[in-house]
Structure formats: C-alpha cells, structure tokens
Image (cartoon, rainbow, N blue to C red):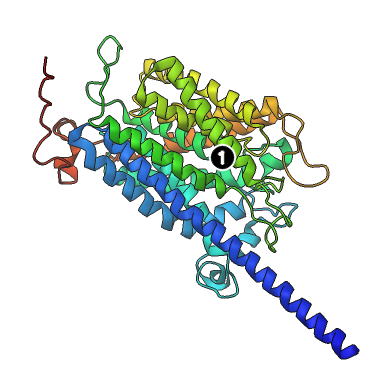
Amino acid sequence: MEEQIAELAAQVAALEGRGALTNTMFAEMFYYITIPLMIIIHAGFLAYEMGASRAKNALSSGVKNILAFAFVIPAFYFFGWWIYWGLPQGFSGAAGPNGLSGAEFANSIAWGWGESAAFMGPNLSDQISGVFWGAFALFAATTASIMSGAVIERIQTVGFVILAIILGGFSWTLAAAWGWHADGWLVLNWGVHDFGAAGLVHAVAAFFALGVLINLGPRIGKFNADGSSNDLPGHNMPFTATGLMLIIVGFWGFLMACVVVGGEAWSWGGNYATIYGTPITLGALAFNILMSIAGGIIGAWIYTKDPFWMMSGALAGIISAASGLDLYFPALAFIVAFGAGIILKPCASILERMGIDDAVGAVTVHGTIGIYGMLMLGIVGAGYPAALGEGAATISLIGQLVGAVVFIAIGLITGYGSSLILRMLGMLRVPEAAEIAGLDTVKVPAQAYPEGILASAPAAE
C-alpha cells in the first residue's frame, strides 16, 4: 500500500512538473511573440516617415529610423535595463517594499557581466529573462521611433542617433522605473496607473521630441516672415497611411507585452496581471483596443475628413485609452478615443501656430493625447486600486496629473538639454545647402527614386 501511495505521489509530482514546464514555455512564448509584433511597429514607422518625407529625403528618413532601432537595443542592454530595476525609488537606488528594485537588486540581475550575466545571456535554468528583456527593449526602441518622425528632413544622422540612445536608454527607462514598476515611487505615493504606457512611453517620447524641435528649428520654407505656415506635404500619402496601419498592427504586440503572465515565480499569481499586479484579461484588450481604434478614426474623420489625420486618429485612439485598457468598459474606451480623434487636429494646429515644425504631428498624437489619456483615467477611474496589495494607493485625477507632469518634465528636460549641447557642438542640424539639395543625395548617399517621379498624365475629358 505504501509503495502504491509513493508511486502515485511520484506520478502527481511528475504531472505537476510537466504542467509547470508547459506554463513556463507558454509564458516564454507569450513574450517572444510580442517582439516580432512590436518590430512591425518599426516597419510602420519606417513607411510612415518615408512617405511623409519629400522625395529628396525619403531614404534619409528611413535610414535614421533603422539606426535608431539598432543603437537603442544595445543601449538598453548595457544600461537601460539596470535603470529600470535600480531606480524605481529614485536616484538613491534604494530598495522598494516589494523587493523587486534597488541598486543591489539591479546589480544582481541586470548587468551583462559578472554574476548577473547569468540573467543577461543564454541560460538553460532561466527561460524568461531574455524574452522579457526583449519586450522591454522594443518599448525603448519605440520611443526613439516616435521622436524620429517629428524631426525628419533636417536633423544630422549622428546627432539623431545620440538623442535616440539618450531617449530609449535613459529618459524613457527612468519614467518606466518611477511609474511602470510595482516599486515605483509614483505608483506607491501617488497611485499613478498607466497600463498601456500612454504617458510613460508616448508622452515621454513626444515631449523629448518637443525639446529637440525647439533647438532644431523648422524646415526651410515651413514658416513665412509673418509667422504663417506652409504645407510641406510628403511625397507618398498611401505609403504613410499603410505605415500607420502597420503601427496599429504592431500595437497589439505592444499592449500584449504590458500583460504579466501568471503562474511563474516572477509573476503576481496564477492569473494575468498588469505591471502593477492588478488583474487584466486578454478579453479586455480585445474589446477595448478595437473600440478605441474605431473611436479615434471616427472622431478624426468627423472633424477633418483628411486621410492622414484619420489614420493618425486610429493611433491617437489607442493611446488615449491605453492607460485604462485594463479597467474600461468598451463603450467608455470608444468615448475616450472619439474625444481624442476630435481634438487631434486642433491641438496640432495650436503647436504649429507656436512656431514648432513637427513634421508628422508626433508631439500631438503621442504627447498631447498621451496626457489626455492619463487624465481621463484619473477622472473616470478614480478610486480603483492603482497597484496590488492591501493599502495600495488608488487612482485619482491628482495622482495622474502628478505622473503626467513628471513624464513631461523627464522628456522635455532631457530632450531639450541633450539637443542644446548637440546644437552647440554643431551636431544637430544639417547645413542649409544640404537641406535644400535633399538629404538622400548628400547624406545617405542614394536616392529613393533615381529615375525621378514623373507627373501623372491629365485625366481624360
């Protein structure tokens, strides 16, 4: 009898171990899939920016985007990952109450050398760190792509790469440590909740871009002596619209990667959770992402009837609802996104009247709408727990406002300061003659259309 019980216990243990292995493999694959999905975002930004550029600058815009991706990844590996785990409590490097942060903790898991290198390279006993890091690295790279579109057609390539490294490796990661980590001081002290990173990815990147634009200045011919502006349309609107749609596709991976899979030693429990430990389901994402896309498009269409702003409205719709995708009922996500689509073009026009030449509206789509989304959650989601645990702070308008101000400050200060230094060193803007001639010929050097773009024949009567 005892032998049978022992044998049965061994079989149960084997089954439990097999189940754990299956769950671990699922968790690993879950994040692994988000990586190529998020790379589609970069394919989208590539097409979006190349189409939004004039023909003489199309390849230059594309090369810049590719280089941003390439340089941010190692930057995030060598120091960005450490910042995320080391500084949630601030620059002191103190450990947080959940035991998942602080300089000592980051030293043990987030350097690519020494003992912590076991977590930062192939390791048969650690099936998740690499793919979890990979998802975060793509968040970092996305911030650089957001900034990239705003500055096309006049920024120096090397200067842009330096800015991308600062944004993706430091600025965004610091914001994430403070507001997108269970030990983050903004979360613990103010109840900041930003599930889909409307503020701490989109707004940080956008206000970083605004800081750069202030020092970079407008494209030649954008503004007249009386302050009025001229339209400098891109050469391929269908390419731009397609790129925007690819970004929407990739955002399913982006938001999927915001979910923490349950059942692992590093997860919050047996169910899906947000980065804060609060509950989330993939069903909530399916309902709310689709409704927010629709709301943003419809709002922008009603106000503008413009294809560019309609597709931008889709992106703005997702961003506006991103903070509360885990909490919203679908109709509410639609309403929030519809409002974002309505205000999108007027907000961009205000920025242009201030003399800022944002070539693709990135500051508005990602920055203004990202802040709008955070504040909307503060209004309609007030009172909900911002994080897991008894006595956790709750969501409030004041808390979301504090978080928004911090995110704006991180982006604007680091973007303005770093670009000012580059301008002083002569590394920010291309010479006037190069800008007039076109950056493809001067800087790439190649041309997207070496045989030229012929004018269409007139329509038959």
Q: Quadrant of the N terminus?
A: bottom right
Residue farthest to the front, as pictured? 461
| Viewer-closest of 112 and 56 | 56
Tell me which corner region of the image, top left, top right, bottom left or bottom right, holds residue 437.
Answer: top left
The residue at 41%/25% (across/down) is: 310
Left or right of 282? Residue 245 is left
Q: Secondary structure at mark 1?
A: loop
- Residue 109 % position (x, y): 59, 64
The residue under label 1 is: 197
Residue occupying image coordinates x 44% and y 54%: 36
Of residue 105 and residue 132, the one placed in the foreground of this image is 132
Camera-side residue: 64 or 456? 456
Quick check: can you spot residue 75? yes
The quadrant in which residue 20 appears is bottom right
Which x, y percent locates residue 440? 18, 41
Can residue 134 be seen here?
no
Where does the C terminus fall, quadrant-wise? top left
Residue 445 locus on image (x, y percent)? 15, 46
Q: Does residue 35 sit above or below 333 in this rendering?
A: below
Q: Residue at x 37, y 42 (%)?
A: 44
Q: Residue furthest right?
A: 1
Mark 1 residue type: Ala
> Which residue is nearer to you in this view: 339 or 15?
15
Q: In the drawing, does residue 102 fall left or right of residue 218?
A: right
Report whether 18 appears left or right of 445. right
Residue shown at the point (52%, 34%) measured from the top left: 318
Is disc 1 surrounded by few (<14), some (14 to 19) or many (20+) residues within 10 Å? many
